[in-house]
Image (spheres, rainbow, N blue to C red):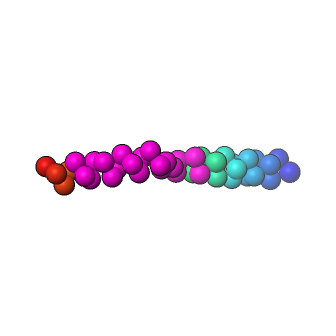
Amino acid sequence: MKKVFLILFAAGLMATSFSSCRENKTIADDVEDVADDVEDAVN
């Protein structure tokens, strides 16, 4: 019984650690990327 809880805890810990590493781009990041592209195109 102890092993079942330990395995479930480890699986939950791994799931949260992998999902929290995703990069979430915001609209501000998109605007900054476009501004950088325009600046590169002008130069």
Residue 21, visible in the rendered structure: yes
Which residue lies at the image location 36% right of the left edge and 45% below the top edge? 32
Give whichever of 30, 6 is nearer the camera: 30
Residue 4 x, y percent position in the rendering: 80, 53
Left or right of 34, for residue 6: right
Residue 12 x, y percent position in the rendering: 70, 50
Which residue lies at the image location 20% right of the left edge and 51% below the top edge? 40
* Displayed quadrant of residue 41: bottom left
Give whichever of 32, 6 is nearer the camera: 32
Residue 14, visible in the rendered structure: no
The magenta segment: 19-39
Which residue in the rendered view is the most extreme toward the left?
43
Left or right of 9, for residue 14: left
What secondary structure prevails in the magenta region? helix
Which residue lies at the image location 47% right of the left edge and 49% below the top edge? 27
Left or right of 6, for residue 43: left
Give whichever of 35, 23 is nearer the camera: 35
